[in-house]
Amino acid sequence: MAECGASGGGSSGDSLDKSITLPPDEVFRNLENAKRFAIDIGGSLTKLAYYSTVQHKVAKVRSFDHSGKDAEQDHEPPYEISVQEEITARLHFIKFENTYIEACLDFIKDHLVNTETKVIPATGGGAYKFKDLIEEKLQLKVDKEDVMTCLIKGCNFVLKNIPHEAFVYQKDMEPEFRFQTNHANIFPYLLVNVGSGVSIVKVETEDMFEWIGGSSIGGGTFWGLGALLTKTKKFDELLHLASKGQHANVDMLVQDIYGGAYQTLGLSGNLIASSFGKSATADKEFSKEDMAKSLLHMISNDIGQLACLYAKLHGLNRVYFGGFFIRGHPVTMHTITYSINFFSKGEVQALFLRHEGYLGAIGAFLKGAEQDNPNQYSWGENYAGSSGLMSTSPELCPTQRARSGTFDLLEMDRLERPLVNLPLLLDPSSYVPDTVDLTDDALAREYWLTCFEEALDGVVKRAVASQPESADAAERAAKFRQKYWSKLQTLRHQPFAYGTLTVRSLLDTREHCLNEFSFPDPYSKVKQKENGVALKCFQCVVQALDALGWEERQLALARGLLAGNVFDWGAKAVSDVLESDPQFGFEEAKRKLQERPWLVDSYSKWLQRLKGPPHKCALIFADNSGIDLILGVFPFVRELLLRGTEVILACNSGPALNDVTYSESLLVAERIAAMDPVVHSALQEEQLLLVQTGSSSPCLDLSRLDKGLATLVRERSADLVVIEGMGRAVHTNYHAALRCESLKLAVLKNAWLAERLGGPLFSVIFKYEVPAE
Amino acid sequence: IRGRRTEVPESAPGARMFPTCATRRARRGQGAEEVGESAGGGEERPARHPPAPALRLPNRKAQGGSEGIKTPENDLQGGLLSRGPLAAPPAPGMGDSGGQPGRCSAHAPGDSAHAGAGAAALNGLLHNGFHPDTAPPRVPLLAELQPQPQLPQHDSPAKKCRLRRRMDSGKKNRPPFPWFGMDIGGTLVKLVYFEPKDITAEEEQEEVENLKSIRKYLTSNTAYGKSGIRDVHLELKNLTMCGRKGNLHFIRFPSCAMHTFIQMGSEKNFSSLHTTLCATGGGAFKFEEDFRMIADLQLHKLDELDCLIQGLLYVDSVGFNGKPECYYFENPTNPELCQKKPYCLDNPYPMLLVNMGSGVSILAVYSKDNYKRVTGTSLGGGTFLGLCCLLTGCETFEEALEMAAKGDSTNVDKLVKDIYGGDYERFGLQGSAVASSFGNMMSKEKRESISKEDLARATLVTITNNIGSIARMCALNENIDRVVFVGNFLRINMVSMKLLAYAMDFWSKGQLKALFLEHEGYFGAVGALLELFKMNDDQ
């Protein structure tokens, strides 16, 4: 009852395949820097975890030493860019069939350069079996970890660190996968692990969990009994048989006994009264498919029933299912879901995990790495390096399950700083950053995938252009193109591969892919140039604003914020104009702006508010470099400062498109301070604070923000949040509810999106919201 | 006490009217009372026979021995009876006192075809096969159905109403012979047949040929056709039902023979007996049309769970020929000391009733009429047999169990120690616990060398443990500590009974008790037969 990893490996894992040639670039990536390993060997699959460091090229910015003698005045950049190597930590997880274990261990041995470790924590039923092999090949001592402990540690880890980790499965629904937003508090929950048997564990805190029950009827029963009944050896083949069968040929249904429904109890005629009940009374042959299907129903229903009984007894309604019986198989997820719905009458939801197969390996790794305290960090799923859900599912392509497809990968980057909720979120548990769920909305999905495909060549061109001195830039850019293109194709067929598909996830995936091929900041030079141009105009713009009357100035500031936002290299419509007409300027952008009333227009309400007392502190999320930041945001900030409002200006920690980064914002602020006494003194007196968001995305997830930012927001009692730009205020957070006043500003630079929202291209969103009392 | 009822002199059946009233008297929960009232309200039917109060009043007055018993019924009759404490159980032997021998003989059994008393008598003769004059009085018929030791407890206002009407109308009703109760399940048909042993020579003479042949056929054989079996060892002897003394026979045959059975009913012209066939189980619904079309028989369909509970309570109350019906296993966790012991189920509530037929239903029973179906599982007796047939090629339940008795499931199942080398201490699991049923069969080598006996045993253990596990969880969720296992899955199945007894005791650390009953699979059929009497009573 307790067994977690399957250990019935005898049937599939005995003959080791040594002939495999591994594609090293794709599978055991970054192995030469591997520091620490862990392994989870189940009945048919091995999951290897290692911790490694990745050397990234990062674009650093810094001020010039102002000797400035020979620089031409007009073309002098405002700061210097240098590409440097930076080392970040990454967790790699690889899942492969046990058949390849020896080949994989050999490969690791050959490529391992400088591991510090002497032991390898191991878990899973097969860990014992392969102990000697591992110790011999890797020269590491196998340290056996408790299966259940690892599983739960792993489960806690993914639930905390991977957004959209858990999902509900609904067969024949669109979408089939409904991902859950992460709760700040993941406890308590019930974990039902369906390995060869079933273990039911109640998890109350990080370290407190209890085995509350189990059942011997599990995956091993399906496999063992199924193999006896159908002479089919492999688990996946059995499932495939089952998916084609008709259980009613084998099962005795209520209608077989009653002739119809059992009315008094409201039991439908289609319910199974007795599993395999017909095979006892008829002298006929039963098809393999039908028997497999009947068996699948019998076992799934039984597991679901017991899970419900335990959930009820312990008063829990979050029930996660894992184990090799589930392993992302739509067939078993469906039957389990059906059973849970039936037996709990909808009170309990069956939840599944995207990385369910990795829980043991993650847990074993975490146990082995306790001295590094990995739980103190936040981690982020790397979309570039991870395979995504169902990447190797036999159901999707049963015939062409090629060898390379049997390697499934998960990579997680250690984030430099821990991420937390924005304290100003009205209800963190119901906050969903994304405005449109592309898994749900097929039309929108089609549009955006095409949009990203069409924009890809431009991104490649820009990436190459950003590194003119690099010899292999074109080659790397081509690889990037191929990778991102294939991700887009995967998402076309499996929109659920990385959780809920959103414009944000498409953008983030592109950033991850760019980083993967050492294009850390393709826009660094563009941003540098634009910042330089804009800085030159700053004083001029400020003077013009100061010359206006108060009311006129407020409108001009708002228009400036919006006009600046038209400059966005990320939006294809704008980049077309900019590339063809470099003279397109700030004034022209303002002219191009929609006249009031805007598409969403609460400016009057905002103006009214400005006539009242100043805000205590404003938190502003900036968007683009250059004109947007310098001629749009800073004048607005300056006005707030003059009103006596403190300002926290939050910029991205890492580069994304032409978005201003935190380090760039520091240099820009320094240059502005040199020109403007208001900004100068505000910086000095800490009325203006520059912080980083913790993000490297063109969008904004208010539930994953830098802890320092959150602390500051709390300390300064921020009472106004300004979110600017399409990525942050429309693709995400358009519906975000905050505890304080908020301004969401954007120019719709995408015709499709504008049309969806009911306006023309370059429509303006000016959304001022005041929380209900 | 259990045996007392059968000791009541047949000459004084009327005396039992008052114990009967006593059984109808006490209600245990207000809720049940209300439910019963409304149900009773729906049962109003016009009396089809002229009332005969003159016959009844003297009779009632004669009940000298019923002092101290107050029932709403007799209260309503005009306070003719003295009152007593509501909860007082009937005094032992009370029913034997002051009886008035059969004075109600003028009443014919209820048959809607007849209106006048004279016609009723005549038709009673014809249809019943017995001379009405010799028939015991009809008044006490309910009394015979009621287990006297439990008189105060199981009663419904609906029945009080029925009784009241009966007393008002003074009709005499007894269903015509033959008396059958039938439970048509998914795999087996269970039939109970009441064989009257008090047939006088005169009656015998009058008994129509058809009826006689049925009686002789059923009672002189123990096997019928290819697959019908009479469980002779379960026969309840010398039982009084509906005023008649006789033996209750327990017969079963496979549900797939149902059409043969209906055909036989047609050929034997069963419909000419004008009996009502009370049937429960899903087959009562499924075959209703066939009964009507082929055999011209109208089934009286009854809910299977109602019948199950009523039948169980009845059989337990009459006992098993002087021995107790209910038993448990002492020392269930110690194979050497484990032994069957009688259990007194006089106060059975609340109980978790686990009915294991082809599938399994689990009921929480709070009183005679207050129960709910908690859940059920499709992994039941049908699954055991179905899988055994597929895995071993066996054909019958007996064969499957015989093989299972010789097998060893640990060759088939993967145990905790097979995985962990011993106990899984982190979770306090013993090494001998089954981790994965059929888990060893994942290995091709082991599949090739496994015996049919081992497979049969593993199937039995898997199904049994699973039922035990679900039952245990239900007991915990419902907060009930007595779990009564019934159903034909347990027939000749000591392995499963001991496993269940073990599982209840072990996993609950002794908190739960597994109980079993001798007539494990027949309660539904008995319940159906009891409905036959009630039905006639209503008329």
Image (tube, coloured by chain):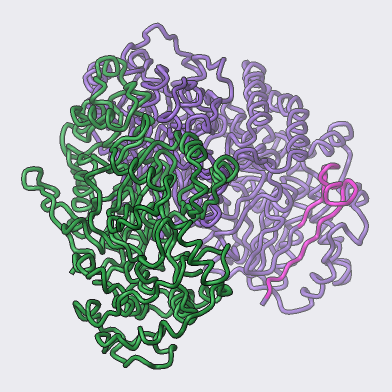
Chain colours: A purple, B green
> Whole-percent x and y of residue A526?
73, 36
Q: Is residue A770 magenta?
A: yes
Q: Quadrant location of residue B443?
A: top left
Q: Quadrant of residue B61?
A: bottom left
In-image side of B42 versus A764 (left or right): left
Percent of width and height locating residue A211: 29, 49
Q: Which residues are magenta?
A: A745-772
Image quadrant where one finds the N terminus of chain B: bottom left
**Residue ID at (17%, 60%):** B343
Q: Which residue sits furthest left?
A: B336
A322 sits to left or right of A270: left
Residue at the image point whose x is 18% and y is 27% from the top: B406
Residue toward you, B374 or A685: B374
Magenta stretch holds residue B239: no
Residue A731, given in percent of the width and then of the height, sits at 72, 48
Quarter where residue B459 is shown: top left
Residue in the image at 41% along x and 48% along y: B211
Q: Nearer the viewer, residue B33 or A490?
A: B33
